[in-house]
Amino acid sequence: MIGDRGMQNEQFSEDDGESTLPSDLSSITISSGPSSAENFPSVEPRVMPWSLLKEMTDDFSAARLVGKGAHGQVYKGVDKDGHAIAVKMLHGFHFDMEIEQMISIIPKVHHPNIVQLIGYCHEIEQVVVEYEGKHVIAAEIHNGLCFEYLPNGSLATYITPDDEDSGLDWQTRYRIIKGTCDGLKYLHEGLRSPIIHMSLNPSHILMDEKMTPKIAGFGSARLFGVENTNITMSPLGTMGYMPPEYIDKQVISKEFDIFSLGVIILKLMKGQKSYHEWDFMSPEKFIELVAHEKWGERLQKTMDVTLVEGHFQQVKKCLEIAVRCVEYDRQKRPTIGEIVRMLNETETSLIPQIDSGLLLHVHPLELTFMLSISLEVPRKKKAASMSSSCSLHLDNKGNDRVAFLLVANSPSRYLAKDPLCGVVPPRCIYTLTLTMCNNKQQALSMPSIDSGADYFTLHSVVVGQYELDKDTISAEYEEFFKKTKEKAGHEVQEVALNVICCQQQADCGTSSDSEPTGPTVERS
């Protein structure tokens, strides 16, 4: 179950922190062929002789070594059918502990998001060795576990300290989140006796050739029956992923894994150091800032404009789930069933609506302005009147001309005091740039990030070929929409666009003192 792209520390060294990790971050293997799970159908793990393990690994040659730690080494083996297998050799008593866990737990688990144990080896070989100048017969113990081989390594490989934008795209990250949750749901709710993993972390989430996540590292797992909680005196888990009730009172419950899951999602979406960044802000503000600063622009750059809004809401929902998972009070954390249900709802909202009835598909539905605040007295008047802009895309997917009128409820806050208006041609995307006046006094008086006090209303209606030409002024548009609403059989659609204002330091480079650019029209 260990891949070429870097062995995961806890997976093969049982959280000892001592390991050697080969890695090649310049390439990721993503295959469209059958997954590793299809190569090995769900069967009971079998006893595998020592001689077979030696044969599969070329007598444990250095060329086959893919990782090592304090408790053993992992080799890439190949069976007689050409399937790759991860062969994990264990030293001494560590085998007894791990094999007991694996044999008691893993055979009960068959799920596409759980790593599969293929076989195990425990042999005692009589060998002749020299001892104090004499040749004596000694027992040499050979211990090993064989798993499906996962070529793309662990999730830890893909989480950087600050999570640069060059990492995994959102769709891949979401599939990892959803697959991990599906696997955990099976452990918690899909078995007669639930399994508490106890050591869920990025190093124990492994990637196959399709970047499908598989939960591994069951060395600390516990089987639970009727009891919902338990107490242990033995240290388990991984630092940074253990919930407070376990650290303080050694309480074990399903909420242990939920807490670990929340930390994983936060790090996958924000970066390695993300967990403590929201200690000094409300969860709501943290979600908004991460969603807009980290993912808003990136989504616009990496996918079709008509898909951005749905995926952006999915980003926010995943952040909301993660924040709830790391609640201090374990009773406030969601169950894994609730989490999967919420994720499924985000997927339903992404299904394209062939005939939604909308005249204009609007993106984004929330207009975000980054306000630059400086507490220093400006030396020049110009420094106190910088502006902040955002783009609004109006997508006409139909075959009719669609007129629009965009009205702000607080027009004095924007450079364009009059309503913005125009006609979107058939099969075209019309882009507007909205610019907010950004001075210190006004910024400090702006509504909070989620107050909903500031908004735009977009009015749209189908117009004929010769109605409202390019020279028509905004006053005529207002009169046209007013009369159209009064006519029977004419539908004027309205969409509310909330305004979100985020404050930041003035030197962060997101504000501008330039005039807003004009609208652009793009043929789709």
Image (cartoon, rainbow, N blue to C red):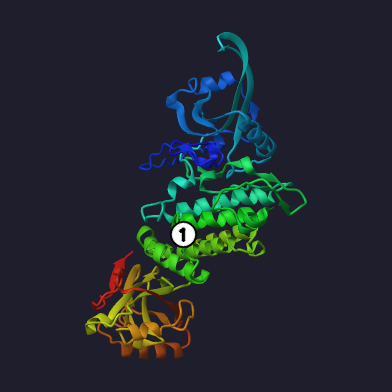
- Give the percent coordinates (x, y) of residue 497: 44, 77
Residue at 36% across / 53% down in the picture? 166
- Give the percent coordinates (x, y) of residue 506: 31, 74
In which quarter of the view is residue 410 placed? bottom left
- Give the percent coordinates (x, y) of residue 476: 32, 89
As drawn, 396 above or below 473: above
Q: Is residue 341 left or right of residue 483?
A: right
As drawn, 75 above or below 349: above
Q: How many marks?
A: 1
Q: Is residue 218 left or right of residue 168?
A: right
In which quarter of the view is residue 247 placed? bottom right
Q: Residue furthest top?
A: 134
- Give the percent coordinates (x, y) of residue 510: 31, 70
> Which element carries disc 1, helix, strand or loop?
loop
Could one spot residue 338 in this view of the protein? yes
Q: Is residue 79 left or right of residue 195?
A: left
Residue at 50% across / 58% down in the picture? 266
Q: Residues within 10 Å of mark 1 (few under 14, many from 20)?
A: some
Q: Quadrant of the C terminus?
A: bottom left
Q: Nearer the viewer, residue 521 or 407?
A: 407
Could one spot residue 253 in this view of the protein? no
Q: Nearer the viewer, residue 190 or 464?
A: 190
As drawn, 143 above or below 336: above
Mark 1 is on which residue type?
Answer: Ser
Q: Residue furthest front?
A: 132
- The residue singled out by tag 1 in the image is 274
In which quarter of the view is residue 129 placed? top right
